[in-house]
Image (cartoon, rainbow, N blue to C red):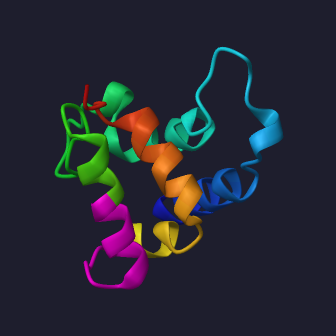
Amino acid sequence: MAGWRTLWLVMFAASYSEGWVAADERPGDALAAACTSCHGVDGRSSSAIPPLAGRDAADIALVLQAFRSGERKGTIMGRIARGYTDQQIQDLAASVGLRRQ
């Protein structure tokens, strides 16, 4: 089961394209949709996986960058984050996290 989830997440992330964003969506919304399979709908995880709800967008970006660089270890997040560009990390964090006013 975990293998299919990983494959789906990687395929979904790889299909991300700025041109596919609808007018009412933010650029990271397509990527953020994949996060729900592990982190729960609206980032409210009901498992041992950390929830994203209530996290600041800047903090989410820092964590994703740490996963991507290998500074932060995880079971799958390092592999997922390695596929993101700096811009995709910023877009994703803005879609998932709280925005500072």
Task: Please name whichever residue, 56 or 43, is drawn nearer the observer in this view of the structure.
Answer: 56
Percent of width and height locating residue 97: 32, 36
Percent of width and height locating residue 11: 70, 57
Examine the rendered structure and indicate whether residue 72 appears above or below residue 18. Answer: below
Task: Please name whichever residue, 52 or 90, is drawn nearer the observer in this view of the structure.
Answer: 90
Indicate left or right for 83 with 49 as reference.
Answer: right
* In magenta segment, residue 72: yes
Image quadrant for the C terminus?
top left
Task: Please name whichever residue, 71 or 78, is drawn nearer the observer in this view of the structure.
Answer: 71
Instruction: Please name the residue shown 42% across and 38% down the image.
Output: 94
> Can residue 76 be seen here?
no
> Overall secondary structure of the magenta stretch?
helix
Instruction: Please name the residue shown 33% across and 42% down the image.
Output: 39
Q: Give the extent of the magenta segment.
A: 62-74
Examine the rendered structure and indicate whether residue 8 appears above or below residue 93. Answer: below
Instruction: Please name the residue shown 34% across and 26% down the image.
Output: 42
> Can residue 17 be seen here?
yes
User: In the orientation shown, which residue stands out farthest toward the front?
Assistant: 101
Percent of width and height locating residue 25: 62, 22
Percent of width and height locating residue 53: 23, 32
Instruction: Please name the residue shown 73% across and 17% down the image.
Output: 23
User: In the orientation shown, which residue stands out farthest toward the top?
Assistant: 24
Residue 3, image quadrant: bottom right
What is the total number of numbered labels drawn onto the structure image? Answer: 0
Indicate left or right for 52 with 36 as reference.
Answer: left
Indicate left or right for 10 with 96 as reference.
Answer: right
